[in-house]
Amino acid sequence: EQEDINFDKNLALFYFAYRAFSKTSDELVGKYGITKVHRRILFFVHRFPGLTIKELLIVLDISKQALNRPMQELTELGWIEKKSHETDKRSKKIYLTESGLAIDQQISQAQNDKMKLLFKESGDPLGTNWTKVMTLYAKETGIPLIDQI
């Protein structure tokens, strides 16, 4: 008979793991003088270049008002750029500049390195089981971009 899994323990571990995961990013975000919203914009625009503002709002699950200032600041820093949409001139597509890409890569590298180490230590070096669980959670958002990851 299989031993019962302690889901309360797993839930608590999930929260603590996210806290540890975020700490690495937060320290680097502080170094660059940006906020978590700036970081999330850089992260998703890097992984989905050419997102529209509307798509980014859906991905970040924030209001247009909450996005406006960080987008303006990232543009002023020269880390993102907006280009006209090919078919809808009222819409802009968002891309990272070379310097924006470099910042995102520096912040992400520390998290990637840690994740690789922990996957190896767990006996699942490719993170196969973790990826399956995270994919199922992510699909619950209903965001179509998840299938492009």
Image (cartoon, helix red, strand yellow):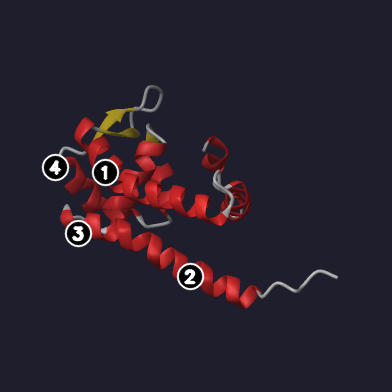
Residue that badge 2 annotates: 15
Q: Can residue 80 be seen in this view?
A: no
Numbered disc in front, either 4 or 3: 3
Residue 121's spot in the image, x, y percent? 51, 55
| Mark nearer the N terminus (4 vs 1) | 4
Residue that badge 1 annotates: 106
| Mark nearer the N terminus (3 vs 2) | 2
Crowd class of label 2 (few under 14; some 14 to 19; many from 20; radius 10 Å): few
* Amino acid at the residue labelled 2: Tyr
* Amino acid at the residue labelled 4: Glu
Q: Which residue is drawn at the image coordinates 59% and 71% (left, top)?
A: 10
Numbered disc in front, either 2 or 4: 2
Using the image as rendered, state which of residue 116 and residue 60 is in the foreground.
Answer: 116
| Mark nearer the N terminus (4 vs 3) | 3
Q: How far apart are marks 3 and 2 (CA)?
A: 22 Å
Crowd class of label 4 (few under 14; some 14 to 19; many from 20; radius 10 Å): few
Residue that badge 4 annotates: 76
| Mark nearer the N terminus (2 vs 4) | 2
Using the image as rendered, state which of residue 18 and residue 55 is in the foreground.
Answer: 18
SS class of the residue under badge 3?
helix
Numbered disc in front, either 4 or 1: 1
SS class of the residue under badge 2?
helix
Q: Distance between the residues labelled 4 and 3?
A: 18 Å
| Mark nearer the N terminus (3 vs 1) | 3
Please state if 80 lies on the left or on the right of 126 as rendered: left
Looking at the rendered structure, the number of numbered marks drawn on it comes to 4
* Amino acid at the residue labelled 3: Gly
Q: Quadrant of residue 44?
A: top left
Disc on res. 30:
3
Q: Which residue is drawn at the image coordinates 45% and 71% (left, top)?
A: 16
